[in-house]
C-alpha cells in the first residue's frame, strides 16, 4: 500500500469514528460543541491538519432554580434576564475549562409580596429553596439572620460585572457590613398629578409645568396638595374620596411619610429600631385629616384591591394626585391605555414630581428607593454558578432592556451614557428624583415595626382611632413584639 493510500485510509477511519461517536452520544439538556483537531503526519514530514466537529455532551449539567415576582409583561425581565444570560454564563465556564454547565428553571408570577416572602421561608425550612430568589432588599434582615441566604461578600470580587453597579446601591444589600445580594433594579416613588383635572380646576399651563420645580424647592408642599385636592372635591371636579390616592395595602411608601415628618428608624450603636411617636402622630393626623375631615381620600382606600387601584388611576380623569412608583408608568400605558395612545397619553395628561415636603416635618421633598436584589439561597449546591449567572445578567444591555420596559431606574454606572437608556424619555426625566431618596432599613425587626406602624395608618385613615389613640396602640404592639429591640421616643 502506498503512503498516499495509507494516509487516505487513516483519514477515512478517523472521520467514520467521529460520526459514530456523535451519533451514539446520549442527548442532554445542555450540549457543548467542540472542535477536535486531529494531526496526521506523513513520512515526508508534511503535517496535514484535519478538523472533525463532533457534539459532546457536557460532562456535568447543574440544575439551578430561580424564583422571581414580576407584574407581567413589563417586569418579566427579572427572571427572563437570567435566562438570556445563560449562554454567556456557560461560555464563560467553557472558556475557563470548567466542565460544568448551567441548566436553568425559572418560576415567575405576580404573587402577593407577603405570600411570596412566606413561600421562600417555608421552602427554606423544608430544604427546597430555589437557588436564586429575587426580592426586596429589606428581606435581608429576616433571611440573613435566619440563615436562609448566603453572605456573598467574599465572592463579589470574582465577577468584574459587579464593579459597574452604582456604588450607593450596595448599601441596600448590606447587613452588619456584609453583602447579601446583588441589585436587580431601582426606582423612585413620585407624586403623579393630572394635568387634565388641574386645568379644570383653573390652573394655567405655566402653573402645571412649573409644579415639579416648585415641589423640588419646597414652595409647594404636602399642605398645598391637600388644599388643591379638597378644592377639586368641593367643586365637583373629582368625586369625594378621589382627590388624592396612595397604595391600597402596606408597603415601603408609607415609610417616607414618617421620614418626611422628621422620624428616624435607626440609631447608631444599636440594632434596635426607633419609633418616633411625634413623627408617627403627624403621619396619622395627616391621614385622619385627608379621610375624615377633607374627604379627599376614601376611608376604605386600604382595601388591598390593586387591580381596581391600577385601572381606576390609569387615565387620570378621576383622581387628582396619586402617590405611586416609577414602574407604574409602564403598567398604566402597557395594560390600560393602549386604546388611547399608550405612553403618549400619559405624557399629555400626567405630570410627576418628588413627594412634597411636610412643613411641620423636615420641610424637604422626599421619595424612596426600594431596590430588588438577586439573593442566593444558603442551600444552593452551586452558589458560584448562581452568582456567575447573576453577573452575566448584570449588564447594561439586559438591565436597560428591563428598565425601559418596566419603568425602573438603571443600576449601572455605564448606563449614564448608554444611548438606549439615555434616550428613554421617562427614565431620563425621573432619574433626578434619586437626589431625594431614602431606603428601608435592613433589619430583622423591620417586618414587625412596619406591621405595627401600618396598624396605626389603617386605624387613623378608617376613622377607627384618633391619631393619638393610634400612636398608643402602635407603641403597645411594638413593646410587646419587639421589647428591647425597639426604642420609643
Image (cartoon, rainbow, N blue to C red):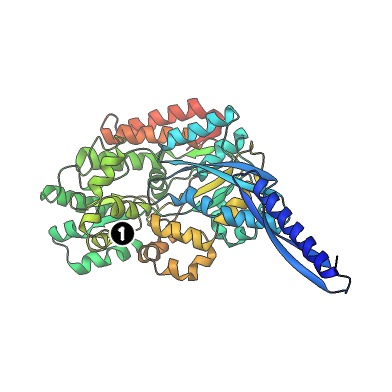
Compared to 335, does 292 lie above or below?
above
- Quadrant in the picture for residue 309: top left
Q: Is residue 439 visible?
A: no
- Quadrant in the picture for residue 193: bottom left
Using residue 388 as the reference point, say whether residue 260 is left or right of it: left
Comparing 474 with 16, the one in front is 16
| Residue at the image point whose x is 57% and y is 48% from the top | 173
Comparing 376 with 55, the one in front is 55
Q: Residue furthest left?
A: 235
Compared to 46, does 146 lie above or below?
above
Q: Is residue 69 visible?
A: yes
Place of residue 72 in the rendered image (x, y in percent of width and height, measured from the top left): 38, 47
| Residue at the image point whose x is 29% and y is 34% from the top | 303
Classed neighbour count for the residue bearing mark 1: other residues with Cα under 10 Å, few (<14), some (14–19), many (≥20): many
Read off the residue under disc 1. 352
Using residue 94 as the reference point, say whether residue 461 is left or right of it: left
Comparing 25 with 79, the one in front is 25
Comparing 487 with 448, the one in front is 448
Amino acid at each position: 500500500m502506498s503512503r498516499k493510500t495509507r494516509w487516505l485510509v487513516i483519514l477515512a477511519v478517523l472521520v467514520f469514528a467521529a460520526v459514530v461517536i456523535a451519533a451514539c452520544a446520549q442527548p442532554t439538556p445542555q450540549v457543548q460543541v467542540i472542535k477536535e483537531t486531529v494531526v496526521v503526519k506523513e513520512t515526508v514530514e508534511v503535517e496535514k491538519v484535519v478538523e472533525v466537529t463532533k457534539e459532546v455532551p457536557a460532562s456535568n449539567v447543574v440544575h439551578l432554580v430561580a424564583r422571581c415576582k414580576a407584574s407581567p409583561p413589563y417586569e418579566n425581565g427579572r427572571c427572563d434576564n437570567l435566562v438570556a444570560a445563560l449562554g454567556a454564563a456557560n461560555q464563560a465556564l467553557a472558556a475557563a475549562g470548567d466542565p460544568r454547565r448551567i441548566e436553568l428553571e425559572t418560576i415567575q408570577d405576580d404573587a402577593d409580596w407577603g405570600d411570596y416572602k412566606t413561600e421562600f421561608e417555608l421552602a427554606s425550612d423544608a430544604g427546597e429553596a430555589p437557588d436564586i430568589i429575587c426580592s426586596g432588599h429589606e428581606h435581608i434582615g429576616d433571611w440573613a439572620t435566619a440563615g436562609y441566604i448566603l453572605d456573598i461578600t467574599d465572592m463579589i470580587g470574582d465577577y468584574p460585572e459587579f464593579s459597574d453597579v452604582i456604588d450607593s446601591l450596595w448599601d441596600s444589600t448590606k447587613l452588619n457590613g456584609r453583602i447579601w445580594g446583588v441589585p436587580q433594579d431601582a426606582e423612585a416613588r413620585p407624586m403623579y398629578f393630572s394635568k387634565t383635572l388641574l386645568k379644570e380646576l383653573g390652573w394655567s399651563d405655566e402653573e402645571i409645568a412649573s409644579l415639579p420645580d416648585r415641589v423640588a424647592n419646597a414652595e409647594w408642599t404636602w399642605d398645598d396638595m391637600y388644599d388643591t385636592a379638597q378644592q377639586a372635591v368641593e367643586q365637583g371636579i373629582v368625586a369625594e374620596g378621589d382627590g388624592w390616592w396612595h397604595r391600597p395595602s402596606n408597603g415601603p411608601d408609607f415609610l417616607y411619610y414618617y421620614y418626611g415628618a422628621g422620624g428616624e428608624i435607626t440609631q447608631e450603636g444599636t440594632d434596635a429600631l426607633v419609633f418616633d411617636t411625634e413623627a408617627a402622630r403627624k403621619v396619622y393626623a395627616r391621614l385622619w385629616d385627608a379621610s375624615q375631615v377633607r374627604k379627599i381620600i376614601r376611608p376604605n382606600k386600604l382595601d388591598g384591591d390593586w387591580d381596581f387601584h391600577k385601572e381606576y388611576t390609569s387615565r387620570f380623569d378621576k383622581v387628582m394626585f396619586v402617590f405611586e412608583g416609577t414602574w407604574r408608568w409602564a403598567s398604566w400605558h402597557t395594560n390600560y391605555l393602549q386604546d388611547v395612545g399608550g405612553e403618549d397619553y400619559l405624557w399629555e395628561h400626567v405630570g410627576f414630581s418628588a413627594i412634597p415636603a411636610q412643613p411641620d416635618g423636615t420641610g424637604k421633598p422626599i421619595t424612596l428607593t426600594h431596590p430588588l436584589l438577586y439573593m442566593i439561597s444558603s442551600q444552593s449546591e452551586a452558589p458560584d454558578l448562581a452568582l456567575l449567572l447573576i453577573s452575566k445578567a448584570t449588564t447594561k444591555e439586559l438591565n436597560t432592556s428591563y428598565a425601559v420596559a418596566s419603568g425602573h431606574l438603571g443600576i449601572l454606572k455605564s448606563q449614564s451614557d448608554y444611548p438606549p437608556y439615555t434616550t428613554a424619555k421617562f427614565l431620563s426625566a425621573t432619574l433626578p428624583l434619586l437626589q431625594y431618596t431614602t431606603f428601608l432599613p435592613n433589619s430583622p425587626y423591620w417586618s414587625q415595626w412596619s406591621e405595627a406602624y401600618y396598624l396605626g395608618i389603617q386605624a387613623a385613615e378608617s376613622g377607627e382611632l384618633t391619631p393619638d389613640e393610634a400612636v398608643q396602640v402602635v407603641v403597645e404592639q411594638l413593646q410587646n413584639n419587639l421589647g428591647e429591640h425597639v426604642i420609643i421616643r
